[in-house]
Image: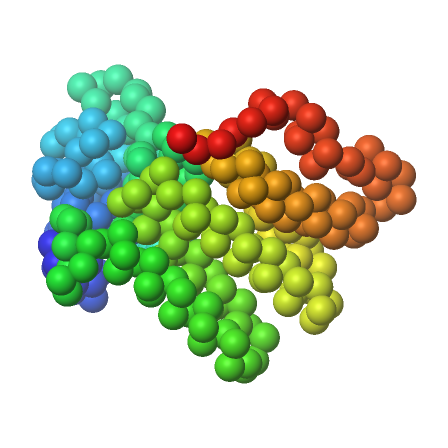
Amino acid sequence: MYSRRLLLIGFLWLLFVSRSTNVFAFSIFSGLIVAQGEQGVKVVEVHPGCPGERAGLRVGDLIMEVDGQKVKTLEEFANMSKAMKDKNIESNLLVIRKSKLENVLLTNYSDNVFKEWKEKVPLPPERGEIIGGVSLFQYYVEKGKTKLEENKQGGPLEAKIARYDEAVRYLFYALHYNPISVEVALLIADTYMNTAKLCLENGRTPLAVENYGKAANLYEKCSKKRVSDKELEQILARLQNVEKELASLLPPEKQEASAGSAEKISTQLPPSKSSP
């Protein structure tokens, strides 16, 4: 609720940016209020808990560059912020602080998921533990599964790809609340795999390769978690399958080098990973 209120305030400020001295920023810059400075954009307020506060931004900092792009006016900053909405989870800022240049890295991804899976994914919009009488973990798992069920009903290609992407986002939100859930991670990997197959069937080869790669990466990570022997066997079978699919799309000279990587992974694993 708090984050939605911030976005609403930010939207209203942006509507009147040409008449206002301050602007409340979107996305990764949510929680910052900035004003026009002499050389760039000056931070005039930093809300507790926002990405800027976690990164160490201070009132009085003068933002000179955003991801290597110079920013001189409020309008430029507002446009950059709006373009990053729901896309960027990291941003490098070059600021002047007490006459010295400082580099500040803003992050807006889940530390829980990153520590467990080394995946940088957006923080879930909801905070707390319970919503609608269920845990937020279960809430987002069900939302992800609902999107997957919707795709079984067919529809235009772009709509199906969008639903798969949305399902992945919800399932990563679920992992934020229960990062050790291999079951959810496997469901995400399966969704990547299904997205890749769908794209390949419709001539979207680059996007297919991208999703095959994501699936292989996550299957490999799942194979290194504490699972039963039966589960490990199933994970490795999925990994071998996606590796074969991915290798078939590579140029002939690269296929041999990529072949058998799943088998190599299986030989490097401990002989038993059974759960107690």
In x, y percent, where is residue 250? 80, 47
Based on the displayed image, in which of its 4 quarters is residue 198 positioned?
bottom right
The reply to whether residue 111 is visible in this rendering is yes
From what the image shows, is residue 199 above or below residue 215?
below
Quadrant in which the N terminus is drawn: bottom left
Residue in the picture at 26% in, 60% down: 139
List the single residue furthest toward the front. Answer: 276
Residue in the picture at 27% in, 56% down: 138
In x, y percent, where is residue 218? 54, 42
- According to the image, what is the colour scheme of the structure? rainbow
In x, y percent, where is residue 152? 52, 76
The reply to whether residue 83 is visible in this rendering is no
Residue in the foreground of this view, choosing between 221 and 164: 221
Q: Is residue 34 left or right of residue 184?
A: left
Residue in the picture at 21% in, 23% down: 97
From what the image shows, is residue 158 above or below residue 56?
below
